[in-house]
Image (tube, grey):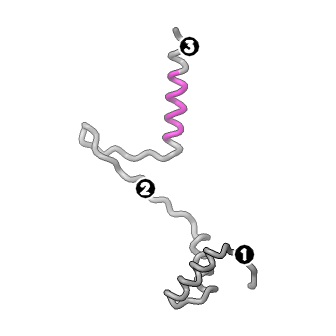
Amino acid sequence: MRTTINLPDSVFRQAKARVALEGLTLKELITSYVVQGLQPCRRSTPPMMAKAATGRPIPALSGDKLAELEIQENIEKYERSTRR
């Protein structure tokens, strides 16, 4: 299928340099990038951090889990402040 895309000049120059270095056509390069972008995301397991005092590894927390913990902490602080 034929289509037209508008790239910033700097991106186009980088793409042209890449095809020259890799011996590809511009079509092949852009097609490979589009195919890569359409692949499903593979999430890796969170990295493990240093060991706790118990000697067990401490798992890294996702952004969602950190946000959840922060909300819970704010709720607990609010509840403590309203008990006075």
Sequence order check, earlier mark of 1 and 3: 1
- Residue closest to the eye, 7 or 38: 7
Q: What whole-number distance in Å separates the C-alpha atoms at marks 1 and 3?
A: 58 Å
Where is residue 5 drawn, in percent x and y?
Answer: 72, 77
Residue drawn at point x = 25 percent, y = 38 percent: 54
Query: What secondary structure is marked by label 1?
Result: loop
Q: Specify the amino acid type for callout 3.
A: Thr
Please give the residue where the numbered disc 3 appears in the rendered image: 82
Sequence order check, earlier mark of 3 and 2: 2
Q: What whole-number distance in Å separates the C-alpha atoms at marks 3 and 2?
A: 40 Å
Please give the residue where the numbered disc 2 appears in the rendered image: 45
Please give the residue where the numbered disc 1 appears in the rendered image: 6
Query: What secondary structure is marked by label 3?
Result: helix
Span shown in magenta: 66-77
**Image quarter hosting the N terminus:** bottom right
Residue 64 - label: none
Query: How many residues crowd around disc 1 within 10 Å: few (fewer than 14), some, or many (20 or more)?
Result: few
- Residue closest to the eye, 72 or 14: 14
Q: Is residue 63 magenta?
A: no
Query: Comparing marks 2 and 1, which lies closer to the viewer?
Result: 1
- Does residue 52 sit above or below 17 in this rendering? above
Q: Specify the amino acid type for callout 2.
A: Thr
Where is residue 44 drawn, in percent x and y?
Answer: 45, 59
Where is residue 59 drawn, in percent x and y?
Answer: 37, 46
